Image (cartoon, rainbow, N blue to C red):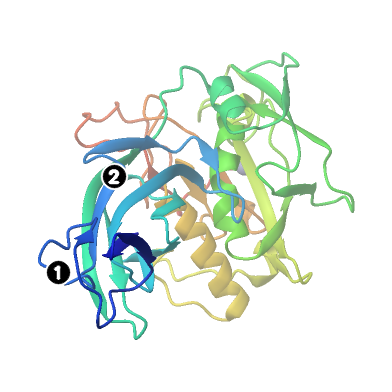
């Protein structure tokens, strides 16, 4: 607020002194008398402040950090907008305050831009901040942080950290594919529950409201048989760390069936680079490849892999200490790779076994 003193009477001025206004102009940086000059500066956040993604934003369930912004505003811009990098975050109110949600992790620059009524930029201010993830000691504490409802157990052979999750999981309904009703609860290892929380926003942001699954826990070997005597390794289903996905359904009731809609790609083409054959095929390819790229699951098997996976995506949390398979390999039990070479994520789309 500027004050224009006139004959000893201070008048509050919303815009600028009008003709005939004499005396001093107080306040702001307008010491040159150009009272229309607009200035911006960040009060908060401080430079290089760190924020953690400790909530799930309501629209799609992405992990998000909440950032309170306060600007020192000189002059009277018509609007002030905030952006993170190239992404517009929204408007800051006239007092210079706003609250924003940051989803992407990493270093970023917040830019505030003040504009006049015609939209021309009058002033900008920037501040560099960091968005990271909270330090959480255990998987169950991670579920607690993000508000996942579950009970511990029951104890089952092979499952290191058993939880029974109340569905939906981060807004996503799960239905056993042979059933008409959604699951009320879902037994799995905590790590798989965490992965379903991370998968949910990929589904929700594409309009998906329900996943049809063919199950999680099955105490068996890869290719069949009962652990621990598994010549081809223990299935991730025995650890309750894998889930088979038969299809997904959107809010309009359109069902995208892995069995019916996925068109098997030529073996010479990579799954996530192959041309697709129809709209639903394209949707399923884009969906599973986006989740794979986000490293939600370590292994993703599609119908490209073999006949046993014709009707579902198999996704699991195989770790580097188990075994490694690469496209074209069958059952190589390689030694763990060097840390440099291993990012913990492999795509497997060719081979004979039932995972
Ligand atoms: Zn499976």
Q: Which residue is mark 2?
A: 43
* Residue under the point 40% across and 34% down: 133
Residue 99 visible at all: yes
Q: Nearer the viewer, residue 244 or 206?
A: 206
Q: Relative to residue 8, is residue 157 depicted above or below?
A: above
Residue 107 visible at all: no
Q: Tell me if 240 is positioned left or right of 42 in this view.
A: right
- Where residue 287 appears, as percent x and y from the top left, is 53, 62
Who comes first in sequence, dot 2 or dot 1? 1
* Residue under the point 38% across and 69% down: 14
- Count residues near mark 2 (Cα–Cα under 10 Å), then give few for <14, some for 14-19, many for 20+: some
Q: Tell me if 88 is positioned left or right of 181 in this view.
A: left
Quadrant assignment, res 87: bottom left
Q: Total label count?
A: 2
Q: Secondary structure at mark 2?
A: strand
Quadrant assignment, res 222: top right
- Where residue 172 appears, as percent x and y from the top left, is 69, 49
Identify the residue at the far left of this view: 32
Query: Which of the numbered marks, if any, corresponds to residue 280?
Result: none
- Count residues near mark 1 (Cα–Cα under 10 Å), then give few for <14, some for 14-19, many for 20+: few
Name the image quarter holding the N terminus. Answer: bottom left
- Where residue 15 appears, as percent x and y from the top left, is 34, 73
* Residue under the point 54% across and 56% down: 202
Q: Secondary structure at mark 1?
A: loop
Q: Which residue is mark 1?
A: 33
Of the four image quadrants, the one with ligand 1 is: top right
Dots 2, 1 in contact, CB < 8 A: no
Q: Nearer the viewer, mark 2 or mark 1?
A: 1
Real-space Cα distance between discs 2 and 1?
Answer: 24 Å
- Where residue 257 appears, as percent x and y from the top left, is 69, 65
Label 1 CB, ligand 1: below 8 Å? no
Q: Nearer the viewer, residue 172 or 273?
A: 172
């Amino acid at each position: 607020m500027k004050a224009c003193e006139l004959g000893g009477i201070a008048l509050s001025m919303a815009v600028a002194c009008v003709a005939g206004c004499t005396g001093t102009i107080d306040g702001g940086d307008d010491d040159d008398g150009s009272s229309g000059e607009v200035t911006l500066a960040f009060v908060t956040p401080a430079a290089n402040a760190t924020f953690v993604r400790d909530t799930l934003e309501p629209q799609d369930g992405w992990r998000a950090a909440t950032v309170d912004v306060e600007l020192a505003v000189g002059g009277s811009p018509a609007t002030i907008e905030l952006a993170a990098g190239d992404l517009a975050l929204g408007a800051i109110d006239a007092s210079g305050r706003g609250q924003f949600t940051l989803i992407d992790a990493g270093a970023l620059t917040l830019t505030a831009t003040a504009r006049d009524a015609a939209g021309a930029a009058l002033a900008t201010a920037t501040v560099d901040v960091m968005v990271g993830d909270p330090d959480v000691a255990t998987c169950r504490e991670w579920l607690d942080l993000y508000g996942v409802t579950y009970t511990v157990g029951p104890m089952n052979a092979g499952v290191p950290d058993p939880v029974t999750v109340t569905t939906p999981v981060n807004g996503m309904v799960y239905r056993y594919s042979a059933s008409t009703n959604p699951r009320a609860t879902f037994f799995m290892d905590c790590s798989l529950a965490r992965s379903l929380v991370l998968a949910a926003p990929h589904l929700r942001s594409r309009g998906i409201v329900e996943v049809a699954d063919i199950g999680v826990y099955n105490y068996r070997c890869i290719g069949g048989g009962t652990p621990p005597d598994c010549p081809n390794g223990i299935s991730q289903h025995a650890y309750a760390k894998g889930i088979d996905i038969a299809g997904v359904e959107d809010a309009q009731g359109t069902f995208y069936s892995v069995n019916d809609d996925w068109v098997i790609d030529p073996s010479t083409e990579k799954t996530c680079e192959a041309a697709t054959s129809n709209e639903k095929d394209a949707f399923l390819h884009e969906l599973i490849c986006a989740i794979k790229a986000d490293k939600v699951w370590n292994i993703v098997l599609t119908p490209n892999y073999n006949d046993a996976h014709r009707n579902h995506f198999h996704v699991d949390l195989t770790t580097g200490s188990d075994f490694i398979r690469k496209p074209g390999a069958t059952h190589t039990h390689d030694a763990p790779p060097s840390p440099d070479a291993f990012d913990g994520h492999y795509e497997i789309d060719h081979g004979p076994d039932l995972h």
